[in-house]
Amino acid sequence: MAQLEQFTHSPQGVDAVVARMRALGAAWPDHDGVAVFNRVYLAVTLEVDRLIDTGEFPDPRAAATLDVRFAERYLAAVDAVAGERRPPACWRPLFQYRRHPGVRPMQFALAGINAHIGHDLALAVVDTCRTLGCEPSELEDEFDRVGDLLVSLEERIREDLMPGPDLLQIADPLTHLLGSWSLERARDGAWAAARTLWALRELPEVVEEFTQRLDAGVGLVGRMLLTPLPD
C-alpha cells in the first residue's frame, strides 16, 4: 500500500492512477475479465479527471482525493493477486473467473463495478474524510457527482458490451441476470455504509466486523453475477 500512497499526496494523483490502469490494460489480454472491468473503470476515471479540470466539482481537491482513494482500493486488489495474496472477498470472484469461457464481458464489467461500488466506495469515503479532516456530509456533492457519472455511463457500458440485440429477448439468462443488479441501489448502499462506518469509527472492533460482513456480502453478489451462462 505504501506505493499507492503517493497518488493522493502527489499533485498528479489522478494522472498517476490513469497511467497505472493504462499499463495494466496493456499487459492483459482484451478478453481477460479483469481487463474488461479495467477498461470501464479507466473510462470513468478519465471523465472524472476531465470534470475536475473543467471545474465541474464544487471542491476539486475533495473530488480528486476521493477519486484517488477509490482507485487505490482496486489497485490494491490487483497488487494482492499479483503478489499471490488474497484480495478482499468482494474482488475474489472476478479474479477467480477472469478467464472462464462461459462468462460474458458484461458480467465481468458488472462484477467489477459491484465490488468497487458496493465495497470499495464506502471505504474510500472514510479514507477521504481522514485524509482531508472532514465529515462525510462535506463530500456528499462530490459523491453524488461521481455517482451520477457512473449511472450515466452504465447504459453506454451495456451497449458496448452486449453482443447483440438477440440478448435482449426475455428468455435469455443474461437479461435476467442484468436485471437483478442496480448501480443506483449499490451507490445508495455505499453512501449508507460510509456514514455508518464513520459514525462507528471510535469502535474499531465493530468497524472491523461491519467491514468484513460488507465485503462478504458484496462478494456473494459478485459470484452470482459471474454465473457461467450458455451461449
Image (tube, rainbow, N blue to C red):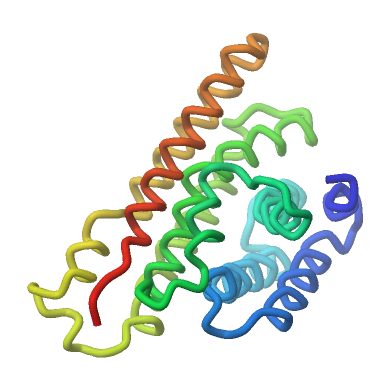
The residue located at (20%, 88%) in the rendering is 165
The residue located at (71%, 57%) in the rendering is 75
Which residue is at the front of the view, 226 or 68?
A: 226
Residue 194 lies, with reference to residue 86, above or below; the image says: above
Using the rendered image of the protein, determine whether residue 59 is visible from the camera's viewpoint: no
The quarter of the image holding the C terminus is bottom left
Using the rendered image of the protein, determine whether residue 216 is visible from the camera's viewpoint: yes
Residue 182 lies, with reference to residue 196, above or below; the image says: below
Residue 126 x/y as whole percent = 65, 32
Residue 48, picture quadrant: bottom right
Tell how many labels. 0
Which residue is at the front of the view, 102 or 43?
A: 102
The residue located at (38%, 68%) in the rendering is 107
Residue 201 x/y as whole percent = 65, 17
Residue 16 x/y as whole percent = 83, 66
Question: Relative to 37, is 86 on the left or the right?
Answer: right
The residue located at (79%, 73%) in the rendering is 19
Residue 196 x/y as whole percent = 51, 22
Which residue is at the front of the view, 229 or 181?
A: 229
Question: Relative to 82, is 4 on the left or the right?
Answer: right
Residue 185 lies, with reference to residue 212, above or below; the image says: below
The quarter of the image holding the N terminus is top right
Residue 12, picture quadrant: bottom right
Which residue is at the front of the view, 148 or 73?
A: 73
